[in-house]
Amino acid sequence: MTRPNPLRTLADIVRVQGSARADHAAILCEGRRVDYAALHRVSKQAAHGILAAGLRPGDRLAYLGKESEHYYELLFAAARSGTVLVPINWRLTAGEVEHILRDSGTSLLFVDSVTTAVAEKVAPDLPGLQIVPLDRPGAPGAGFTEWVSAYPDSELLIRARPDDPIVQMYTSGTTGLPKGVVLAHRSFFAVPNAMASEGLDWIDFRESDRSLIGMPGFHVGGLWWAVQGFAHGATNIAMREFTPSGAVELIRDLGVTTACMVPAMLRFVLAEPGVTKADFSTLRKIIYGGAPIAESLLAQCIEGFGCDFAQIYGLTETGNTVLCLPPADHVPGTRRMRAAGRAYPGFGLAILDDSGNRLPAGEIGEVCVRTPAAMVEYWNLPEATAKTLIDGWVHTGDAGYLDEDGYLFIQDRIKDMIIVAGENVYPAEIENAITKHPDVAEAAVVGVPDERWGEAVHAFVVPVAGRQPQARDLAEFLQDRLADFKAPLAYEFIDAVPRNPSGKILRRELRDRFWRDQERAVS
């Protein structure tokens, strides 16, 4: 039996690996190399800088930028200073960014050249916000390097505990405003320890691995995956921004052995012009998740990449993965290929009806999980927390059933979430933005099947009497109000939004015709 990893906090990772694997590459990013000794040193300096800026343990700092080595240096600096890192999606609009900064109480913000303009736009409305540029014009990373060089390379006396918060990740909600999901250090160690306790290698990590972080670090999947690589002393390869050609190049030229991606990314990589199986000769395993995958695409991936595959299922609220479909179950043509996976050892999985009763195998209900990696809370939202965390169970909002062997099959969503290329999108947020247009009386948004993105946003719009907005007008109106991945791909004008007697939008009536010929009501 493999022993669980003795590491218990993210601060432990850099202390141990900084000594044990000092000269080994920890991060490769756009030709830059950071070894574990440097990661250990810089994270100590940055921790001093965070405290010098006036933050104290429990306070929030934020990172708004594309992927870089500095994101992970700041993550470990937060762990060493007892502060909490708030990763922000760089594709969000200024209004969306301002909400996250204000809601989290962030007082220290790190930005790169791509996001400087957004930060400067929101700063006047956020008194006390300190902004540190990561880049200088023409010198990527120079600003951060100069900032950390002012602080000592010495250990702080602050010692994090497994239950202390380390990140606060924002996920869109049914109310239309993103909620801050607070995750503790323990969230990043529970799954590998559970597998190790039973000697399972469903998702395994090796010191010799070159691990591609396909998902961005502002998503729990990307962050969780990166932390696993660091914890096991592997080399982590960060893409500043995912592109199919860039992924192929990194896998081929840097000898990537493991990678974590969403299904849409896998599709794009396989479709890249000129790509051959030889480009993926060093790959031994791909982990995928974030959205359901079509069985046909999965079969193409198994053939095209020529390596093992493992599917993971989870939420930000569960600290990422709670289930896994192991490589052994990836047999094309078998029923298991349609499953989301089964629970890790010691994790709970149940299907509940509306009254909270367990349903037998084969019956569809809400997917609920019990995991030692579960979130601490929704930040400053006790009522919302109580609706999701009930008696130790996380209510996912997904609908599915278990087979006789305990494998989960996702069928639909109880909540109204749409998944666009792995990005979680909630209709209420989009509807709120659309109805701010002076020519719109009502709006309803649903997800529809999309071959390229998995799902696409489709908006139903009720015009104000006597007016007729055009789709292009609405698209232009939303440009500065919603991130591009949330924007509807199509608008349909209707006379009235269907509602039940209590006024709730009957989304199923709107979306059923799009899904009628699909095997399941998620894509």
Image (cartoon, rainbow, N blue to C red):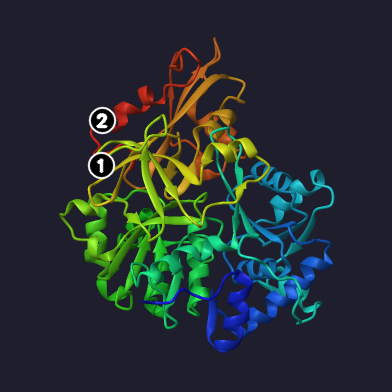
- The quadrant holding residue 201 is bottom left
Residue at point 58%, 50% (across, down): 91
Kindly identify which numbered label has been placed on residue 165. none
Viewer-side label of 2, 1: 1
- The quadrant holding residue 515 is top left
In what element is the residue under mark 1?
A: loop
Mark 2 closeness class: few <14, some 14–19, many ≥20 residues within 10 Å: few
Q: Can residue 211 be seen in this view?
A: yes
Residue bearing the label numbered 2: 516
Residue bearing the label numbered 1: 361
The correct choice, above or below, for 333 with respect to 431 in the image is below
Q: Is residue 179 left or right of residue 49?
A: left
Q: Is residue 274 visible?
A: no
Question: Residue 354: x and y, percent?
Answer: 40, 29
Residue at point 75%, 46% (across, down): 122
Q: Which label's residue is closer to the chain start, 2 or 1?
A: 1
Q: Which residue lies furthest to the left in this view?
A: 333
Q: State how far apart marks 2 and 1 are (Cα).
A: 25 Å
